Image: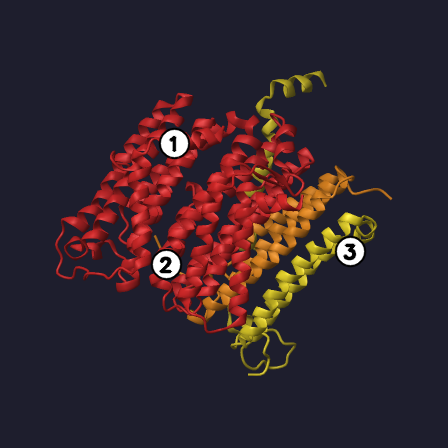
Chain colours: A orange, B red, C yellow
């Protein structure tokens, strides 16, 4: 069984990163923006795991970094969703274009 | 081995114990006085500060992930002192607030993250502590729970900080891919010149830092977040969190990317140029005083970056010295603003017309702080900026110093405009005489002593300079 | 090959080609996506189009009616506590090695105990706050 070359995995992760970036910059729903951020973080996870497995198989640093990224992403999402709920309570919308009280 | 931990990490331990203590107290009884919570926290912070000056250990723990020495301890002391001042200033706002214990828990969590961040010598530790110091800040920004603009500020803060840490993480992952290690020392020795992927990683990490210190291409969230957050959180964001990230930035630039010094010199010069100019130009047109201070703090970051561009011990010392001065002067200004906003709800620059008539002491305080921010000679801000420009000039970029000087003149205009509003302008609806409680009064006195003293006492810069070596 | 060595040794701008390609890829991807979706995407916004697809069954009501906040709260708390369990995994994997080592045995045990203790305080705080109270 032949192994997938590293470069393909890196292409996948960079592609995922830019899809996340695209979503972050164009979506208007805050929840979707959060999902885009998760995509960005997961592309980094793929990077770490791939580098660890292909280039430095004798160590675990990359894997552990991934574990920490996953947990912190969960914490970040929890705080963000709490803020979004609070925002929703005050003006009944999760659209970023309605969050327009602060400008310039 | 065991005792080693306790001595080496005494800042972090005291803060962590305070957090747990507050949680347990809060769980134990719902009805506890805000004053008690504030006093316990302030007392423990003060204890940590005093201990930080007495016990000065040096060493590594956690498999060299955590490193502490005199320089790191000084930085932690600066942050703890700043947090203590903010906590004293916030007492007016927190007096009748129902979530005081939670406020302190979140505030101290971010402080804990910053202390770990300053000591981190490993990218995993660095990332963890960075997130620990930014995620609770977003929750803090939302602490005016019923105000829409507060939630909006918190949303902007968490999304931009999540995005910036995503960028930084991508950079770290590339760094890991090219060097095979994540500890600062090993990365520094494994880095090679002219590896495109490493340069790309550096650019990404730089962008992540740029977001956190709000350097110009990445500054867009700053003003909104500063305006929407409660004043205590705004002052915390503008000095403490920015200062902590800048301290780590010094380590990352000077140690990890030392080999790339030639490349990042130009990057920092260009970014600092834009930061100064754009921060100043936007500060000119602001009417809200929190927003005004947000843009002024952006332009101050530009000056700090000039100091960083030197890349020597002198520039590290000058940056730390400037941050000390900046903490005192900015907190002095924010202390008055917090008081005015907390008691009258006014936060426009025009509302400060005729402020001197009824509030002599507060006016002088704000005046001195603004003079220091503008960099006018007798107060400390001048010396801070002087040392920054001096260390920036070491590389011979005199045109940069000239542009910085022009920017100082521009900034003089808008700072003095506020001073003119306070002292000279008359108004029919000027603010009444405000009662000042004991805690803000203490904080104010500390700030005045700090602003005047750190400029006149020449030993301070020498002390910092000796520690950098 | 000799030519290539020369290029790398003097570090010409060719070394930065991958960065340039990545930047072009980034910018091009975004531009392509915006242009492509505008070109391909449907632009007919009739009332039928905007209705929810329900396999022919007439839809009733709006999915966006306010949901009780407790669902979100419990979901968030579940995710948090669920994900943090990940940190037990490295401990569990290395448990046998730790158990063999007389000093590490208690050292690691205290570390895990501390971790669980922090969580326990948080959990008690949540219960005290009434976040998990399902019936009003």
Percent of width and height locating residue A82: 52, 65
The answer to whether residue C42 shows anywhere in this view is: no
Seen in the picture, residue B386 relative to B119 is either above or below; the reply is: above
In front here: B163 or B323?
B323
From the viewer's perspective, is B458 left or right of B134?
left
Residue at image mark 2: B90
Which residue: 57% across, 60% down?
A77
The reply to whether dot 1 and dot 3 touch (C-beta < 8 Å) is: no
Q: Tell me the quadrant of the picture where the N terminus of chain B can be found.
A: top right
**Residue A44 visible in the current orientation:** yes
Mark 1, residues whose alpha carbon is within 10 Å: few (<14), some, or many (≥20)? many
Of circles 1 and 3, the one toward us is 1
* Subunit ID for the residue under disc 1: B
In primary-sequence order, the first of circles 1 and 2 is 2
Side of B134 where B33 appears, left or right: left
* C-alpha distance separating marks 3 and 2: 45 Å
Please name the residue shown 61% across and 48% down the image: A17
Q: Residue at x 61, y 69 (%)?
A: C75
Q: Which residue is mark 1?
A: B461
Q: Tell me the residue at 60%/71% (across/down).
A: C74
Q: Name the residue beneath numbered marker 3.
A: C92
């Amino acid at each position: 069984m032949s192994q997938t070359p590293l470069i393909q995995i890196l292409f996948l992760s960079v592609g995922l990163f830019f899809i996340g970036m695209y979503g972050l910059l164009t979506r208007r729903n805050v929840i979707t923006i959060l999902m885009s951020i998760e995509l960005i973080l997961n592309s980094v996870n793929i990077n770490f795991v791939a580098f660890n497995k292909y280039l430095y198989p004798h160590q675990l640093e990359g894997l552990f970094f991934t574990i920490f990224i996953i947990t912190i992403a969960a914490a970040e999402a929890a705080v963000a969703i709490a803020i979004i709920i609070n925002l929703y309570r005050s003006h009944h919308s999760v659209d970023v274009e309605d969050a327009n009280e602060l400008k310039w | 081995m065991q005792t080693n931990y306790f001595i080496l990490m005494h800042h972090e331990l005291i803060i962590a114990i305070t957090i747990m203590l507050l949680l347990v107290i809060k769980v134990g009884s719902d009805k506890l006085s805000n004053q008690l919570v504030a006093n316990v926290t302030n007392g423990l912070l003060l204890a940590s500060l005093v201990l930080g000056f007495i016990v000065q250990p040096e060493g590594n723990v956690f498999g060299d992930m955590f490193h502490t020495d005199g320089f790191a301890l000084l930085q932690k002391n600066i942050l703890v002192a700043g947090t203590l001042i903010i906590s004293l200033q916030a007492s007016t706002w927190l007096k009748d607030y129902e979530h005081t214990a939670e406020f302190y828990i979140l505030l101290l969590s971010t402080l804990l993250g910053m202390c770990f961040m300053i000591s981190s010598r490993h990218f995993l530790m660095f990332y963890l502590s960075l997130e620990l110091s930014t995620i609770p800040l977003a929750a803090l920004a939302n602490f005016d729970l019923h105000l829409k603009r507060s939630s909006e500020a918190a949303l902007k803060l968490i999304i931009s900080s999540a995005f910036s840490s995503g960028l930084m993480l991508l950079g770290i992952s590339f760094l890991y891919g090219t060097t095979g290690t994540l500890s600062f020392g090993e990365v520094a020795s494994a880095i090679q010149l002219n590896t495109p992927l490493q340069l790309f990683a550096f650019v990404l990490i730089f962008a992540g830092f740029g977001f956190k210190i709000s350097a110009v291409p990445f500054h867009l969230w700053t003003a909104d977040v500063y305006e929407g957050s409660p004043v205590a959180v705004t002052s915390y964001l503008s000095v403490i969190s920015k200062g902590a990230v800048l301290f780590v930035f010094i380590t990352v630039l000077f140690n990890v990317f030392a080999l790339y010094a030639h490349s990042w010199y130009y990057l920092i010069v260009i970014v600092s140029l834009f930061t100064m100019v754009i921060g100043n130009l936007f500060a000119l047109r602001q009417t809200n005083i929190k927003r005004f201070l947000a843009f002024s703090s952006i332009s101050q970051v530009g000056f700090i970056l000039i100091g960083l561009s030197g890349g020597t011990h002198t520039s590290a010392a000058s940056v730390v010295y400037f941050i000390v001065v900046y903490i005192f002067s900015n907190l002095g200004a924010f202390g008055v603003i917090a008081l005015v906003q907390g008691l009258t709800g006014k936060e426009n620059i025009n509302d400060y017309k005729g402020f001197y008539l009824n509030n002599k002491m507060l006016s002088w305080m704000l005046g001195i702080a603004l003079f220091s921010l503008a960099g006018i000679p007798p107060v400390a801000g001048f010396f801070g900026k002087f040392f920054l420009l001096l260390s920036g000039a070491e590389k011979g970029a005199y045109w940069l110093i000239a542009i910085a000087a022009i920017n100082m003149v521009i900034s003089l205009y808008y700072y003095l405009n506020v001073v003119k509003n306070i002292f000279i302008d008359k108004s029919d609806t000027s603010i009444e005489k405000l009662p000042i409680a004991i805690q803000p009064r203490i904080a104010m006195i500390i700030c005045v002593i700090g602003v005047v003293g750190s400029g006149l006492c020449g030993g301070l810069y020498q002390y910092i300079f000796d520690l950098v070596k | 090959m000799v030519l290539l060595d020369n290029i790398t040794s003097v570090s010409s701008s060719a070394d930065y080609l991958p960065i340039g390609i990545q930047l072009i890829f980034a910018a091009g991807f975004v531009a392509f996506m915006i242009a492509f979706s505008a070109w391909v995407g449907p632009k007919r916004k009739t009332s039928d189009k905007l209705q929810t697809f329900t396999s022919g069954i007439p839809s009733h009501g709006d999915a966006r009616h306010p949901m009780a906040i407790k669902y979100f709260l419990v979901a968030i708390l579940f995710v948090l506590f669920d994900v943090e369990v990940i940190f037990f995994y490295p401990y569990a994997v290395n448990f046998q090695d730790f158990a063999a080592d007389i000093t590490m045995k208690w050292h690691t045990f205290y570390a895990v105990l501390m971790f669980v203790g922090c969580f326990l305080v948080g959990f008690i705080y949540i219960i005290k706050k009434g976040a998990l109270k399902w019936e009003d």
